[in-house]
Image: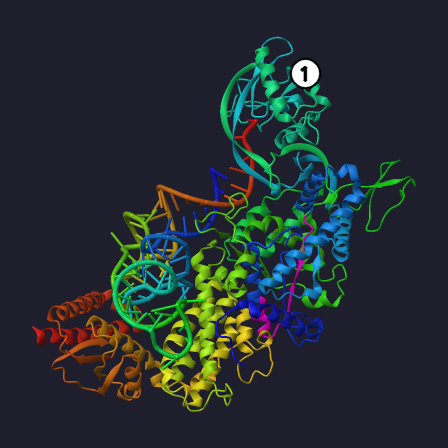
Amino acid sequence: MELSKTYSPHEFEDRIYAKWVASGAFTANPDNVLSGAKKPYTIVIPPPNITGQLHVGHAFNNTLQDIIIRVKRMQGYETLWLPGTDHASIATESKIVAAMAEEGLTKESIGREEFLKRAWDWKVKYGGRIIGQLKKLGSSCDWSRERFTMDEGCSRAVQKVFVELYNKQQIYRGVRIVNWCPKCRTSISDVEVEFEEQQGNFWHISYPLKDGSGSLIIATTRPETMLGDTAVAVNPDDPRYSALVGKTLVLPLINREIPIVADSYVDKEFGTGAVKITPAHDPNDFEVGVRHSLPVIRVMDDGGAMNENAGVYQGLDRYKARKKIVADLDELGLLVKVEPHTHNVGTCQRCGTTVEPTASRQWFVKMDELAKPAIDIVKTGELKYVPKRFENMYLAWMENIRDWCVSRQLWWGHRIPAYYCDKCGETVVSETEVHSCPKCGGNVTQDPDTLDTWFSSALWPFSTLGYPDTESKDYKAFYPTQTLVTGFDIIPFWVARMIFSGLAYTGKKPFDAVIIHGIIRDAQGRKMSKTLGNGIDPLEVIDKFGADALRLAVVIGIAPGNDTRWTDDKILYARNFVNKLWNASRYLLLNLTGEETGILPVSLEPEDKWLITSLHGVIATVTENIENFDIGVAIGNLIDFFWKAFCDDYVELTKTRITTDINVRNVLTYALSVFLKLFHPFIPFVTEEIYSALPNVQGKLLITSEYPTVDKELILRIADEQTGLFGQVLESITAIRKLRKEKDIPDKAKVNIEIETPHTALFEYSAKFFVKLCNAESVIISDKVDEQGKTVTVCLDQRIFIPSGELFDKEKELARLNKELAKVSKEIEFSENKLNNPNFIAKAPEQQVAAEKERYAKNLEKKDTIQKSLHAIQ
RNA sequence: GGAGGCUUAGCUCAGCUGGUUAGAGCGCCUGCUUCACACGCAGGAGGUCGUUGGUUCGAGCCCAAUAGUCUCCACCA
């Protein structure tokens, strides 16, 4: 089979993907694990939102996972990369609501049932889109096991866990301050709040004492919440106010009588030292309220407008109310001072609306007991983060964790399996539907709320593998999983919750290692965002350059955990490399005669031995780097070795014998097949396509071929003294080319070369290389060269001469030699300093000292040669 | 306020447990359409590794301080 003349990915990418799928290579077989035949290697995908479109971040994340899983598959593990999508309750629901608004519909107008029908339609319509896009990337997921967080199995896991937690009293319902988003009209958890600096005011307001003996001045950034004030607090040790504690104030505007309480929460230094206490709209105030048994009065409704407790302000939006309240206070002469104040305001991660802390009855997961084992397992190193520094982030978050508000006032998601008796108020929590109160037989109503979307994501590593059926084959074979690959931004949302959930519900850590990667920024280092419009569409990139180039572009030059930039340079470089691989392969295939086996011949030339030995060195480094999840280094080494050592050196060296020597064609075939295997996890399509054209493949697929390993026996058998010295031949070629350039010898002019070397046998063998690659007329190798009338350059153990010639330019030659002299003199000085340092001799390791001495001696010789040449022309 | 990252060639970034002359890609300069590839080949120029101290025989790497920059966490009403 012949490769087409130019590399055009579209001719084969889809065809090859279909071939992989048909071959069953993606499909995991638990029997192989349960029988002990193979070790499992499982990765669960971070499930993309059903509403999502593939962006370059997905491309990055999934390329990394695919690289790992493909390597493991080739290494003989029973691999499972389990794909799926997330229902993303709030994100999806808000999109559906927005779409309905265009039709003039609201959730309420169509009702819950109709709404959910639409949502499922939405899921069917868009859920498949991102899956198709992941396939375009080449992701080798087991599509037969594709899951969805709201499918039957995942839902069962959610219900079971909820009920179990409830029975253990680790989940409770209560009134607490939650982050309320007035636009999404739901509570959100602490991690869903993003703080942003906002320019605001600090309003100083006078609250008169009931007894008319004066007033107290408080300072606030949210004057509208004063309508819900039920006290004013001062620090118990504040002498300014000690006499006032216990007295009563009259809250302006609505004339409620409120006490002055003492609480150490108040900072004497800040503001006026007196704090208005609004238990219903501030988390700290809520705590103060609990301590002092203060009433909780909500003054805003779910949409962020003032409610019936706000008196004349009822119905006004919170910001309009703020304006009016300030104006009214001013009119009453109670507004003492307004100072500009910048502060951080919590906003809804989803819609950007300023969050309103609000006292509300919600479901919470108690975190203290769940967090402890999740902290320990990371601290003991049993579950590790790569790179390690992200453990700090995780531990800091886990150690300061607060109870997790899991109920959402949304319809799209897992409905909370709690039922309340209409008659006696009894709460029943059950995995199965409840129709009547077990206590009084009265009618029950199911909690209308749904669970935080992350509640189901937290169970993903095991809910997708059969849990709660812990006897299922998949669960037994593939859980716990091995690695999780994700971005650092999602550690608190997802990773942490999977860890404590796994430990609590399955008794096992959900994975051994968490591989954290950075984000892809634009060429200027900015975050890619819709508003900036600086995003890269991976599908367009695939269209233009192919999926392999895209995959390569996102992993080139990455360091673990670090951000990386997307630049046009990178994708071009990636494409160019794939093209290079394509053409190098084409070159070999064009030269094959059909007799080749790809088996290494017994008789090998020095350059063959050098290549094979170096290639096995590269197998070792690449494998090691992948084991350490150092993907950027692994691919860097591989590309570098392929391009430079293989293409530029070995292929060029062997051009003289490729048509005449079947041995070299076998070495080339062998090397190329090793390269294809090493490259395959990174650029699967093109490597598979080329592989199919190799001789002796017999229809076998690269995806399931064996990953190369270092063959120590082979290396021991073939490596000899010349193998180690072969680099000197290559460097001599470069030295001669350089000398030719420096002496302005035209490329086409042939030149007579004399090489003085202790390695005469190897260099005599290599004479043909100098003839071809340095355009030599003749090459004389000896251990002693007459320097008369020649120009010299020193390269490692060699002194290389060419005739000074007619083009001899004395000035130029002097300059060249002086430059070399200066360089070598500097190195000699450096060595002398070192060797004259008695501490170096005494303390440095012996081989270090020996190496320095050898280097020193060689440089002295080199200097001598250059000086002689200088003398000769002067 | 707390934690962490980054600072190395004009640009983007590597640099493992400290050990010869600090690497790559792009860009730049010179030459080459050599029968796999100009998406290429050959050669070259370019860096006092943010700054200052310290540890060490030896520091891009370890320690301390400092500057710039980015991120995360907390959040004083």
Colour mode of the rendering:
rainbow
- Letter of the chain that mark 1 sits on in the rendering: A
Secondary structure, mark 1, is: loop
Q: Residue furthest top?
A: A212
- The relative height of residue A193 versus residue A630 in the rendered view (above or below) is above
Toward the viewer: A337 or B18? Answer: A337
* Residue A22 x %, y %: 67, 72
* Residue A725 x %, y %: 32, 81
Toward the viewer: A61 or A540? Answer: A540
Range of the magenta residues?
A69-88
Residue that label 1 marks:
A254
Q: Residue furthest left?
A: A874
Name the side, left or right, on which A503 lies relative to A805: right
Residue A76 magenta:
yes
* Residue A757 x %, y %: 23, 83
- The relative height of residue A266 versus residue A112 in the rendered view (above or below) is above
* Callout 1 crowding tier (Cα within 10 Å): few <14, some 14–19, many ≥20: some
Name the side, left or right, on which A504 lies relative to A666: right
The picture quadrant where one finds residue A112 is top right
Residue visible at 58% across and 36% down in the picture: A346
Q: Quadrant of the image for the C terminus of chain A?
A: bottom left
Q: Is residue A5 visible?
A: yes
